[in-house]
Amino acid sequence: MNTASDLVKITTKKLLSENGMSVDYIEGMINKLCSSGVDFGDIFFMCSVSESWRLSEQKIKSGAFSIDQGFGVRGVLGEKTALAHSDEINNHSLHQAIRAARTLSNKGGSSDVRLNLNPSYKIYNTGNYDPINSIGREQKVQMLNEIDRFARSLDSRVREVKIGLNSSNESSLLFTTEGVTAAEITPQVTLSCAVIVEENGVSESGHSASGKIYDLSFFYEDVPVLPDDYVRGVSSVSSVETEPRYLAIARDAVRQALLNLRAVPIKAGTMPVVLASGWPAVLIHEAIGHGLEADACRKGQSVFHDKMGEEVASKLCTIVDDGTVDNGTGTFNVDSEGVPSKRNILIENGVLKSFMYDKLNARLMGKESTGNGRRADYYCKPIPRMTNTYLLSGKDSPQDIIRSLDDGIYAVDFSGGQVDTVAGKFTFTATEAYRVKNGEIKYPVKDATLIGNAIGVMKNISMVGNNLEFDKGTGSCGKQGQSIRVGLGQPTLRIDSVTVGGSR
């Protein structure tokens, strides 16, 4: 298992030595940046190696491989940030970037920084995997073709299958004006399958995906075969039969598409809603999480900006942002500013306790960074971002929560939504949902859109399950043009009253 020092050595060789650069030169450039009088700054190197495969119309349509590397130099003074970057890693380019970043300040400052090349922060991602080379090209093509054939064999109504396989390995190396040295190696794989089915001229679609900070052997692991009428959180899995995860993903996509063929359009109205565990936490991520990022709060662009210490959710709700979760999609060792990952309680028993801070906003707001300063690439500046954001388990069983519904909706899966963080309003569309009457699931529904106000909905949570579950490893989040990996999770929960938009 790699230590923090090991990761620094590995990435130093890859990003510096192999490009003819030395740590001594970097230390000199850090001191040159400091001497301009900036409050703080850093040099961030990154290399991303990625491969993708696409299948549609029963053919491999594309296979792509890319390497993207470079560095960014950042200087911060007050609220201002200077950022210079280059895709050429060499001494000359770095010197030019330092000159550009120094234009932010000319007041002069201390220049006696010594870099700590043996950091000792705790390791959560070891980086000990090679996702791209974990299996050969022929095996990857074979996997995609097998998924296509398998999905079509499950039902004669399957008309099209689209599959995407992605592997990437990101290496980053950071040097700060405080003398911090930090490194991260993140191998990641994802597999997605989209299916279109048709019956009597009516077409519907289904989608399933999974991923992990790991290598491609993840998709060959055996998982239980789920029944065709499986409903997550309700159905039990009694079969001992197993199949590789890559086939299970296809089976789930076909199941969802066929479910949508018989789904009934829902009538709009206000009703109680039960959200399943896992991915439905996208509502918490979007409606709550983004509103608790410090840049929005500092600028008064969040409904939560003046609510610190106030009750903003049901007393049953404790929401955490935690970059240390085992196997979390948003787990890392240190953030993009060299701050070690932390477990931060955002809302505790319904009361707002903390925002998520990067170094800049923490400094301006008189706080400490919470380890949420993240950037998507070397040419981006760090901004406050979520890691793994989730609602802690409660005491209710999922079955009891569903049985509590006299007449309502059980929402299992969601597509994207829209959020206004200033007003706290949101809309989310369910891709898999069921009508519940007298505590029993009756039939699938479609076009169910949840509409509401973040604080109002959170205060309406009356039951929280004992079954915390995280997403399937494919979570990503976009903000200010930067897309990063994130995790999210929740147990089953009941919201007593939500406006549900429908198509009839």
Image (cartoon, rainbow, N blue to C red):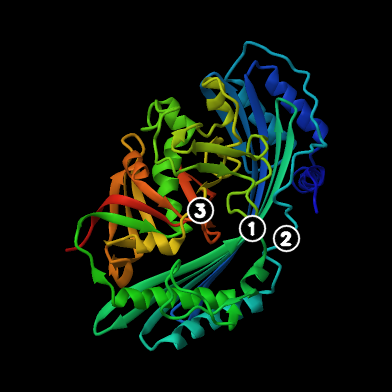
Residue 131: image quadrant is: bottom right
Hey, what amino acid is under mark 1?
Ile
Left or right, 444 with respect to 105, comes to left
Q: Which residue is mark 1?
A: 213
The answer to whether residue 201 is above or below residue 333 is below
Q: Secondary structure at mark 2?
A: loop
Q: Residue at x 75, y 57 (%)?
A: 128
Q: Residue at x 64, y 56 (%)?
A: 327
Return the disc, 3 or 1, that comes first in the chain's sequence.
1
Q: Specify few, some or many for label 1: CA neighbours under 10 Å numbering under 14, 14-19, or 20 or more.
A: many
Left or right, 35 with respect to 240, comes to right
Question: Which of 5/324 is in front?
Answer: 324
- Mark 2 or 3, closer to the camera: 3
| CB under 8 Å between discs 2 and 3 | no
Q: Which residue is mark 3?
A: 489
Alpha carbon distance from label 3 to label 1: 17 Å
Relative image position of residue 265 (x, y in whole percent):
22, 68
Q: Which residue is mark 2?
A: 129
Hey, what amino acid is under mark 2?
Tyr
Q: Is residue 130 visible?
A: yes
Relative image position of residue 471 (x, y in whole percent):
52, 58
Left or right, 247 with respect to 419, comes to right
Residue 245: image quadrant is: bottom right
Alpha carbon distance from label 2 to label 3: 25 Å
Placement of the C terminus among the 4 image quadrants: bottom left
Return the disc, 2 or 3, that comes first in the chain's sequence.
2
Q: Secondary structure at mark 1?
A: loop
Residue that extends furthest to the top in the rendered view of this protein = 107
- Mark 3 or 1, closer to the camera: 3
Q: Specify few, some or many for label 2: CA neighbours under 10 Å numbering under 14, 14-19, or 20 or more.
A: some
